[in-house]
Amino acid sequence: MQDRIAAELLRVFPGNTEMARRMRQIDWSQTSMGPVSEWPENLRLALGICLTSRFPMHLWWGPDLTLFYNDAYISFLGPSKHPAMLGRSGCEAWAEVWDTIGPMINKVRSAGEASWSEDTLMFFDRQLPQEEVYVTFSVSPVLGEDGTIDGLYCTCSEVTGKIVGARRLDTLRQLGLLAEEHNAEEACRLAMSVISRNPWDIPCAALYLLDEDGHSARLTASTGLE
C-alpha cells in the first residue's frame, strides 16, 4: 500500500528537486486541494512540466489560486516566503504586488488568453521590504477537458540586474560627457543636474568645493535635500 502511494506521488511530483520532495511530503488531503489520488490529469501534467523545468515557473490552481512552484522560482519568493507559501493562496503569497498582477490574472482567467509583461517594475517583500525588482513574465491558462480554465501557468525571468545596471551606466555616461572647460562651480551644477535624473540610485546628493586654504567647504549644488 505504501509503495503504491509513494509511486503515485512520484508520478505526480516527479524528480529529486527540493520542491518535488517538499510536495511529496505534504498531506494534501488536509488542504483545499484534496487527496492527490483525486487530482485531475491536467493538474498532474502541469505539475510535471513545472517541476522538471529549469526555468523559473509556478502554477496557480483552482479558485483559491493555490501556489505550486519549482526550484528555479525559489529566489523570487525569498526566505520570508519559501517554503511557507507552498500550497497557499497566490493572493496571500503576493499580497504586496496584487494591485499590479491581480488585474492581469483576472483578465487571463476571464478571456482565456495569455498575458505578456516585459521589464515590469514591482516592489517585493523579499530580501528587504519593498525591494525594487524588475520582472518579465507571462501568465497562461491551463484548460480542463470541457474548456474551462482550471489553473494558470506563469513563467518568469528577473531582469533587475539588467535594468538597474543599464540605468547606472547611463548616469555614469552622462557624467563623463560633461565638458572639461567648465569651471568648478559650473561643473558641479551640471553634474548635479545629471544625478538628479536618477533618484532611484542616488536619492540625495550634495557637492562641496573646498576653499583655497583647504580648511573649509561650501555647498555648490545638491538634489533631494531641503
Image: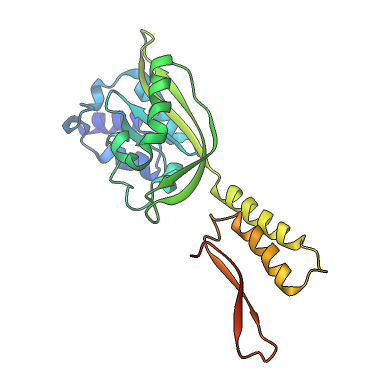
* Spot occupied by residue 25 in the image (x, y as percentages of width and height): 26, 40
69, 110: nearer the viewer: 110
How far from the left and from the top, in percent, is residue 29? 18, 30
Label count reads 0
Residue 135 is at least partly visible in this image: yes
Picture residue at 54% right of the left edge, 48% below the top: 160
Name the residue: 52% across, 61% down.
Answer: 224
Q: In terms of image quadrants, where is residue 5?
A: top left
Query: Residue 49, can we see it?
Result: no
Q: Is residue 194 above or below residue 216?
A: above
Report the front residue among 221 and 165: 221
Side of 19 relative to 207 (left or right)? left
Q: Is residue 181 left or right of residue 108?
A: right
Residue most extreme to the top:
146
Residue 33 location (% of width, % of height)? 23, 27
Tell me how the rendering is colored: rainbow
- Above or below for 175 versus 124: below
90 vs 131, left or right, is: left
Q: Please state which of residues 142 and 165 is positioned toward the viewer in this rendering.
A: 165
Estimate the x, y position of residue 45 in percent, counting from the top left.
Answer: 40, 23
Identity of the residue furthest to the right in this view: 181
Residue 106: name its quadrant.
Answer: top left
In what quadrant of the picture does the N terminus appear?
top left
Image height check: is 107 above or below 190?
above
Q: Residue at x 68, y 69 (%)?
A: 188
